Image (cartoon, grey):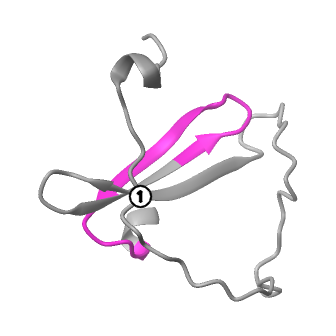
């Protein structure tokens, strides 16, 4: 399968004006284990994830993606109508 080319696909980022609350302080109760070390050569030693929201013609849906840092491939994904714990589990 050929990688997605954003220009060829005519994809455009559109921001709906959503604002995230910024606390200005780090979460000391959640350790930063990865510490921005994204070069992982050993399988099953590091993953990276994100949750994004996508407009699906009628409503916002939330997409969670987990990427294996060693293989640089999507390891898991989930789509939901709510950005809750069930989405990422």
Asked if one can make out residue 89 in the rendered structure from this viewpoint, the answer is: no
Q: Residue at x 77, y 45 (%)?
A: 45
Q: Which residues are magenta?
A: 66-85
Residue at the outermost top position: 2
Q: Position of residue 30 (x, y in %)?
A: 76, 80
Residue 12 is drawn in which quadrant? top left
Task: Indicate the position of residue 8 as horizontal and vertical percent values.
Answer: 39, 16
Q: Nearer the viewer, residue 89 or 54?
A: 54
Residue 78 horizontal side relative to residue 24, left or right: left
Q: Residue at x 66, y 50 (%)?
A: 48
* Vertical side of 40 occupied by 16: above or below: below
Tell me: 41 left or right of 47. right
Q: Against 48, is 73 above or below?
A: above
The image shows residue 54 at horizontal and vertical percentages of 32, 54
- Is there any visible trace of residue 34 in the rendered image? yes
Residue at x 85% of width, y 36% of height: 39
Residue where numbered disc 1 is placed: 15
Label 1 Cα neighbours within 10 Å, binned few <14 / some 14-19 / many ≥20: few
Residue 25 coordinates in the image, percent (x, y): 80, 87
């Amino acid at each position: 399968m050929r990688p997605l080319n954003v220009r060829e696909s005519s994809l455009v980022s559109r921001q709906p004006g959503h604002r995230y609350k910024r606390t200005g302080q780090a979460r000391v109760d959640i350790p930063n284990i990865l510490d921005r070390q994204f070069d992982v050569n050993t399988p099953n030693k590091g993953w990276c994830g994100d949750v994004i929201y996508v407009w699906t013609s009628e409503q916002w849906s939330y997409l969670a993606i987990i990427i294996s840092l060693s293989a640089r491939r999507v390891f898991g994904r989930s789509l939901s109508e709510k950005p809750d714990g069930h989405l990422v589990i």
